[in-house]
Image: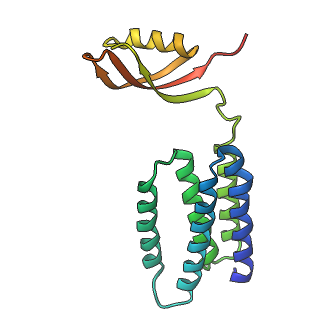
Amino acid sequence: MPASVMIPIDVVAVLLLVFGLYFPRHGRRDMVVALLGINVGVLAVATVLSGSSATAGLGLGLFGVLSIIRLRSQELDQEEVVYYFTALALGLIGGIRVDPAWIAPSLVAAMLFVIFVGDHPRLFAQTRSQIVTLDRAYASEPELTVRLAELLDADIRRVKVKRLNLVNDTTVVAVRYVMRSAT
């Protein structure tokens, strides 16, 4: 598909990704510019590389390194990492010529659809995950699980002790749980 068609498809797709899906669901203003910037940057480089003697591997390697540096410079949630790489992939697909022509728009639509469904607020809406610091050292996992269920008013699915401090009498735990229905 020619650049005159794929570039507008990419721009519309990244705008939908950022302003239609990401920002309404996650609300991090600083990620808006990051997602838009990485997408347009990748689109520009992929477009230039597709018309030059340099290989796409060189461009992909460059952006892979830049992405790793960016992702390690600040803590991102798993969802934000997915949005970040989707923006990157949209730019690459928009900038590289793919035959047959219908494949690129189909991949763009598939990525947006997967993000829409996989990150939908109603999907597993009662499921939570968090790090909890307790003001008591719990050496017994069953006792810890009961205490967390009481504190969180939830059904505990998984407990992983991150730190057990017997001197300061604290427990730090990663817990996954399902909220109990309001009755």
Total number of numbered discs in the rendering: 0
Q: Residue at x 40, y 24 (%)?
A: 173
Q: Is residue 89 above or below residue 54?
A: above
Give the image location of residue 103, x and y in percent: 66, 69
Q: Residue at x 48, y 79 (%)?
A: 56
Q: Residue at x 41, y 62 (%)?
A: 69
Give the image location of residue 24, x and y in percent: 72, 47
**Residue 2 visible in the displayed image:** no
Residue 99 versus residue 125: which sits nearer the camera?
125
Q: Is residue 27 above or below residue 149?
A: below
Query: Residue at the bottom extreme?
Result: 53
Q: Residue 178's image quarter?
A: top right
Q: Residue 97's image quarter?
A: bottom right
Q: Is residue 92 left or right of residue 65?
A: right
Give the image location of residue 124, x and y in percent: 64, 31
Give the image location of residue 168, x and y in percent: 29, 17
Q: Is residue 174 left or right of residue 165?
A: right
